Amino acid sequence: MPNRSQIEAQAALLRQRFEVAGGVVVDPPLLQSAELLLDLYGEDIRARAYVTSDALRGEQMLRPDFTLPVVQMHMKNGAEPARYTYAGQVFRRQEHDPDRANEFVQVGYEVFDRSDPADADAEVFALFHLQLRGLELRVATGDIGILMAAVDGLQTTEVRKAALRRHIWRPRRFRALLDRFAGRSPMPESRRMLVSTSGALTGTVPEIGKRRAKEIDDRVEILRKDAAAPPVSDHEMAALEALLAVRETVPYAMEQMRDIAVDLPAILPALDRLEARAAAMKARGIDVDRLDFEASYGRTSMEYYDGFVFGFYAERRPDLPPIATGGRYDALTRLLGQGGEIPAVGGVIRPDLILTLAEETRS
Amino acid sequence: MSIKLGVPSKGRLMEKTFDWFARRGITLSRSGSEREYAGAVDGVQGVDLVLLSAGEIPRELAAGRVHLGVTGTDLVHEKLPRWEQQVEELEPLGFGDADLILAVPQCWIDVDTLEDLDAVAAAFRREHGHRLRIATKYHRLVREFLADAGVADYQLVDSQGATEGTVKIETAEMVADITSSGETLRANHLKILSDGLVLRSQATLWRSRVARYTGDEKTALKSLLARIDN
């Protein structure tokens, strides 16, 4: 096990390399407003982050990652384009696995640049690749943007598409919704009764709570309309399923997805972006022909990545968390930008895990 | 030394626990005054009775300060992460039945399943500018249940008592609470989601996996368990 000073030294080295690449060093505070984190991630963040509080500022969280404060800082007063780097502790509450660290160091690099997103993706990936060279790692890549485009392009109602978009990061609920919209799962009896009626139904029991009768009637109307809407077609379902299952090297994945795009033409612009990224990566010396691409990759991580996603894993140590992860999060800048937005991509490395792996190789 | 048996210190849970052991030839009794939280055990050698609040028993088991304890499944699952590694379930006692359930206002005629709840939570947040609030004292259990079911856009608000009343006074939109007959829920115009059973709980005898046993204590444990098995 590497000790603290070794980890600090490794972190400093990694950060220095990011500085050389153009990253300006930033050092966000350890305590973050819990409100913002809760707004973004919902209640699930409470299972992952330590919460504390005082009477003045209310609930605060020990930062579970750097991306959020860096985006906030940039959106408030950052000049464009910008590249940032940082190194420091993050804190993760652990409720299930005592072997997972609840405090560890992350070193990161974030790019805010609207000129050429494909090249910014490639820049970040190539930098991480360089930082980790020499270690035997499996590299996973994906692109949430392709899935989002597929959902947007479905020949179905806006309500259904919005529901699916909301759950791209929760694969099980996504699947259940998809089965419902395709008419593959039986409608619950309660829903069947509800939609077989007409007219307003509220008013038979006492109205209590903040959710008003109008909201209830509105939803009943939505459900009735939904029941009358045709199911998502079999060929679209088949295409979507094929897309979710794509797991190949980049060139073959591209070929497969071009085929799938015959039934889901809405993904074509996203595929063009993937192709541009692959070209930019190649230009930066990445062996794209042997790089893995997995269309479902990144769906179970924290839900701010909405484009390119990547992760580096120690294949011989499946017990270890990923050594590095990253991706594109344009939508997050929009959410925190108060009207502003900028394409953004970045990632983090864990110096402690690099040292652990290096130790193993030596012994 | 004797092994320590932790039992709820008051109310029906205590009485029923005493009855349960009495039927197995073990007499538990409070020693001295009502205020004293120590007791006596007759009918088996080497066992001490410790009277504790039911809510403290999981922690005492996990710390190994009591060897055996009687408390609800709900409390063990809520308070002890990875409870299987800290305690062993010896015997359900057949009383103290209570289900941890999710309940919404009866007037939500459009909500019967978790799928409905999830859709309503999204709409509620758009309409009211805050996440749909669920009043509960079982934060961990409810959060894990909802995460597993893929329900988003809710928030848990803490409620340590009179939870069913929070909807009416609009400090929460719905509740996650323990119910046995559902009567309190109905009286408060609430209904249970058809797939909203978070946990089925009853009073249970647990053994601490953490507590240490001397030779004598092992013997005491064995003879106690032999009585219980009969």
Image: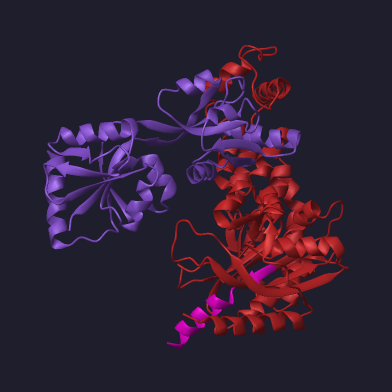
Chain colours: A red, B purple
Q: At 16% across and 51% down in the image, what residue appears?
A: B221
Q: Nearer the viewer, residue A127 or B44?
A: B44
Q: Quadrant of the C terminus of chain A?
A: bottom left
Give the residue furthest to the bottom.
A362
In the foreground, A349 or A92: A92
Quarter occupied by residue A332: bottom right
B103 vs B109: above or below = below
User: Position of B107 compared to B103: left or right?
Assistant: right
Q: Based on the displayed image, in which of its 4 quarters is residue A351 positioned?
A: bottom right
Expressed as whole percent of the image width and height from the top left, the position of residue B94 reads: 27, 32
Residue A3 versus residue A152: which sits nearer the camera?
A3
Q: Quadrant of residue A145?
A: bottom right
Q: Is residue A278 magenta?
A: no
Given residues A85 and B11, the one toward you in this image is B11
* Prevailing secondary structure of the magenta residues: helix
Residue A193 seen in render: yes
Residue B69 drawn at (x, y percent)? 28, 46
Q: Residue at x 79, y 57 (%)?
A: A333
Magenta stretch: residue A354 in it?
yes
Identify the magenta region.
Answer: A347-363
From the viewer's perspective, is residue B132 above or below residue A58? Answer: above
Q: Residue A232 appears at what percent x and percent y?
A: 65, 34
Compared with residue A182, is residue A333 higher up or lower down, i.e. above or below? Answer: below
Answer left or right for B160 relative to A289.
left
Q: How many marks?
A: 0
